[in-house]
Image: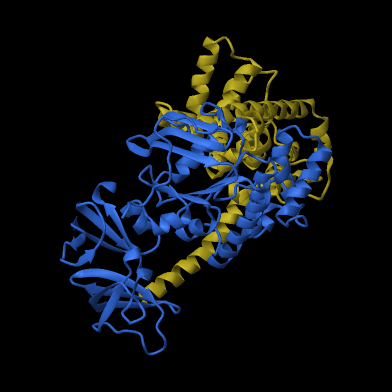
Amino acid sequence: MRDDAVDVALKIAGSIVRPLVYTTLSLPAVIVVASSFTAGDDLRFPPEGFSPRWYMAAFKSDMFMGSLWTSTKLAFVTMVLSLTLGMAAAFAIDRRSFPGKHAFRTLTLSPLIVPMVVLGLGLLQFLAWMRLNQSFLGLLIGHVLITLPYVVRTLNAGMVLFDRTLEQAAMNLRAPPSKVFRRITLPLLAPAFVSAGVFAFVTSFGNITLSIFLGFARATTLPVQIFAYVEHNYDPVLAAVSTLVIVVTLGMIAIVEKLVGMEKVA
Amino acid sequence: MSIAQAGSAPAPGALPASPADTVVSLCDVRKTFGDFVALEKLSLDMRKGELLCLLGPSGCGKTTTLRIIAGFLEADSGHVFINGQDVTALPPYKRDTGMVFQSYALFPHMTVAANVAFGLENLGIPRAERNRQVDDVLTLVELNDLTHRYPRELSGGQQQRVALARALALRPAVLLLDEPFSNLDAQLRTRLREELRRLIDRVNITTLFVTHDQEEALMLSDRIAVMNRGRIEQISTPENIYERPATRFVAEFIGRCSILEGRANGGHFVSKAGLRLPIDAAPGDVTLIIRPEYIDVASPAVTGIVADARVIATSYFGALTRIQLSVEGESLMMEKHFSAGRKPKVGDAMQVVVDPKGIRVIPVSAY
């Protein structure tokens, strides 16, 4: 009887808390998207009327479009590099036994543990020492570093589930290792690669802390640009640009959903 | 009485006796995993066209042997020959073997046809010829109407046939089967077993077959190598393995039997409990093996060694009833059909006859 009472209580509590959580999670995005379509001059919710004018303004702004391009370029190159390095690391962790393997594994995940501000400060000093500060390369190194844990983790999860008998079967059918990798391993690990790539892209695209530390005038990423803009202005173009960021991110997640299903990734 | 003849394993270190007739030859292959000795100086010859079965309990080294032949494992020492060529140092993709994996290992992202074509593609066979050969081999396994299906759309039995077709497509020197029936239910297993035997006979391919199922081994094999703890206990025909087990392990692993330990002396055997049986063997400690079908209920029609027995336990299997008997303190097992109402009950006294032809003598040194 007592258990039943507890169950009922938890059930009621759950039905109250759940909508609250979902609302709190989605409300900011909903407000931003809604206010981006305002016809008025002020950023406010609820919006006044409906108009795409602030999107036109955003598309015409060299500042925002330039930083959108920078962010996209940075996220893409970060994704490619992170996938390449992450694949090597994940394969080593999955298939080789070497001294310090456990430590190596922890090391690849460590950028997740170090606070981003500390990482940014450390990288700033390190890159200055390397004479790589104020360079796209420096920014890129930073972004690869913070995306690598996601890539290694996602690829490793995919590899653990991969049936290596298939590689043996291919070898038994006279396929040399390069062909086994190309025709068997890679296609079957494709879902893991796609999700790892999307994680890398989205993480890099949305990052602000590291980009503030490592960015410079000619390489201002979109989140940094929005952050800088909002200090002095407060108009609906911000909402329009932010909505673009949401759309890009959602688009990438939709790709994962379509290709592998989000539940396998998260 | 002569001791059961073991199959002729080659002398240690010997190269295959007649390379022309020997397809696979293992010479003194040893394999360890850390402290565990998986194979202890194993030597084995396979003749062209034969179906040889490696039979043994799990951990006996049978799968290790198969994987060493395929090249997935490297032997610590010793040599592997395929068609007279020393392949010990060759990688799997340079060895002329076709393997059917226990899990079948079909490529999930390829259709049935693409799975079968994969090996032919690696051999560089042109597309038209490749397609023809894929058709041929899929017809052979009666799957030519499923060419565009994916493995996940096939039943277990169909998957097994695809795996077999994929291995056969390359016409390998030796077909390697790793417990190919273990993933199927009992009924299907029996049917596919017969199908497999017919298929292998038709393509006349040298086949090495790994199983822990004695029934499978007895039914399918030309020869059986019974393995235990990394060694071959006996290699011979199924009949010899069953009727003339070379060691106590073989006798106990294959079929059922009564085992009597004791001493042979002057034409007699005296068991530890005191049961006396006339045998013809050199004096010394011996073990007697008696298969249940050589023990019968005494009647004027059967001749042999008559003994008084008491029924200890019975198990009914329909066609047969297995009866555990106590004969002068020793336990003997009999299997016989009893008509309705005639089945002996526990505690019954009866006279039994042991057929002297059914008594196998194994010197204690043989295990």
Q: Nearer the viewer, residue B54 or A264?
A: B54
Q: Please state if B351 lies on the left or on the right of B21 as rendered.
A: left
* Residue B193: quadrant of the picture: bottom right
- Examine the rendered structure and indicate whether residue B232 appears above or below residue A106: below
The answer to whether B254 is drawn above or below residue B60 in the figure is below
B26 and B118: which is toward the camera: B26
Residue B183 placement: quadrant:
bottom right
* Residue B292 location (% of width, % of height): 35, 69
Q: Which chain is blue?
A: B
B139 left or right of A123 in image:
right
| Residue A249 % position (x, y) | 68, 40
Of residue A243 and residue A112, the one placed in the foreground of this image is: A112
User: Is B114 on the left-hand or right-hand side of A12?
Assistant: right
Return the x and y of residue A50 as percentages of the image width and height.
82, 49
Disc tally is 0
From the image, which quarter does the N terminus of chain A lie in?
A: bottom left
| Residue occupying image coordinates x 23% and y 74% | B326
Above or below B13: residue A198: below
| Towards the viewer: B230 or A6 | B230
Q: Residue furthest bottom?
A: B341
Left or right of A207? Residue A55 is right
Residue B359: in sight, yes or no?
A: yes
Residue drawn 24% across and 50% down? B364
The quarter of the picture where residue B144 lies is bottom right
Q: Residue A196 at x, y = what percent?
A: 61, 37
Q: Is residue A11 above or below residue A181?
A: below
Q: Is residue A210 visible?
A: no
User: Which chain, by letter, is yellow?
Assistant: A
